[in-house]
Amino acid sequence: MHTISLSHILPRIFADNPPLSDVWRQRVEFVAGQSYLLQADSGKGKSSLFAYIYGYRDDFEGEILFDGRRTPPVGSPEWDTIRQSRIGILFQDLKIFPELTAIENIELKNRLQAYKSEAEIDDMLRRLEISDKRHQPCGKLSWGQQQRVAIIRALCQPFDFLLLDEPISHIDDRMARIVAELIAEEVASRQAAVVVSSIGKELPITYDNTLNL
């Protein structure tokens, strides 16, 4: 997939009072190989936008197109393929299974296509300094540690576009730089696009485009 195009998208909840925005009711195109920062105050719809692109919700006006083709209906089996091989995502609420260990949460994703080797996963755990947490239930980890688990999990699949919803909200600046280096390497190796949302704490990578919700 080379492009994701937004054509006059607007959450229906904003229909009576649409906010000023670089995205809502505009024409916006995300292109593989580019990096994008979505800046927004809380409540402006950044998580909703990611849910629309990822096919989880359809409570919006306008159109989303993948390579010029309108996205399939929510619930269509076609989304299984898109989510497994075209679009990766880090949810703001992480969607971690607290009763499973860190490595079990990661393996849930990796088993779908065996995209990363055990050695590669071990290296990511080491770089993000959570190797010693691999066998701990995620419910016993801090939120920042859970974010790092969820980041590794998001990288354990092929993708053309990577959506990161506030990826470092609970990660200190030193670790944020390490996370940024890992993500930048992964995105570059796949010639993928990365779209990052922020309400003030930005993932420290170089952005080609900045959009304000």
Image: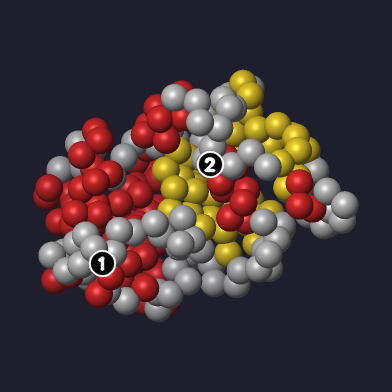
Answer with left or right where residue 91 lies relative to residue 132. right
Answer with left or right where residue 140 lies relative to residue 195. left
Residue at the image point whose x is 54% and y is 37% from the top: 55
How many marks do you count on the picture?
2
Type of amino acid under label 2: Tyr
Residue at the image point whose x is 19% and y is 62% from the top: 101
- Report crowding for label 2: few under 14, some 14 to 19, many 20 or more residues within 10 A (C-alpha): some
Residue at the image point whose x is 24% and y is 33% from the top: 113
Task: Residue 42: tell me if it is visible.
Answer: yes
Q: Nearer the viewer, residue 41 or 17?
A: 17
Query: Residue 150 location, x and y as percent?
Result: 34, 58
Answer above or below: position of 142 versus 36: below
Query: Residue 91 location, x and y as percent?
Result: 46, 55
> Secondary structure under badge 1?
helix
- Report crowding for label 1: few under 14, some 14 to 19, many 20 or more residues within 10 A (C-alpha): many
Identify the residue position indicated by label 1 in the image.
138
Residue at the image point whose x is 58% and y is 64% from the top: 198
> Residue 100's quadrant in the figure?
bottom left
> Secondary structure under badge 2?
loop
Identify the residue position indicated by label 2 in the image.
56
